[in-house]
Image: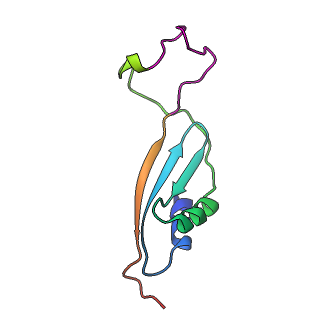
Amino acid sequence: MTHVVDALCRCTRAGEYVLATARFVPDSGEVIASVPDQPAISACVAKLSSERFTPFEAPSDCIGCGPQHFRPQRGGAGHDAGAKEPSAHFVISLKLDRSMEATQ
């Protein structure tokens, strides 16, 4: 997470205020950071925050819960027995407020 915050600080200037998101994908070890309403800053952040972490399987305490009727049943028609269930991901919203910094 520190590399995302570092990238945000390096890609913005004094006087700016940005809302960013960081999406963590445990299965692949990726962190995808973006600033949706500011494409130039988003591109800079994506370039600088490309660090990865050791992949892991996200645990779940949900056993048999949720709307089962939206997914094909295991072994049923349209189900690929070798396909992996979609992984969990975590999305964190970040606000970087540099509006009070003196601009030069």
Q: Residue shown at 59%/59% (left/top)?
A: 46
Q: Taking 10 as reference, is 71 left or right?
A: left
Query: Residue 37 versus residue 33: which sits nearer the camera?
Result: 37
Q: In this view, does 95 lie to the left or right of 47?
A: left
Q: Give the farthest residue toward the bottom.
A: 104
Q: Examine the rendered structure and indicate whether residue 41 appears above or below residue 67.
A: below
Residues in magenta? 71-87
- Classified by dominant secondary structure, the portion drawn in magenta counts as loop
Whether the magenta-drawn stretch holds residue 80 is answered as yes
Residue 20 spot, x, y in % from top left: 45, 60
Above/below status of 31 relative to 83: below
Of residues 80 and 55, the one nearer the viewer is 80
Residue occupying image coordinates x 50% and y 79%: 13
In this rendered view, identify the residue nearer to me: 76 or 50: 76
Based on the displayed image, in which of its 4 quarters is residue 77 positioned?
Answer: top right
Give residue 38's position: percent from left, percent from top. 49, 66
Location of residue 103 in the rendering, given as x and y in whole percent from the top left corner: 45, 88
Can you tell which quarter of the image residue 78 is in?
A: top right
Q: Is residue 57 above or below residue 29?
A: above
Task: Residue at 52% x, 46% y: name it.
Answer: 24
Q: Where is residue 73 in the image (x, y as percent from the top left)?
A: 48, 12
Q: Is residue 69 magenta?
A: no
Tell me: 76 left or right of 82. left
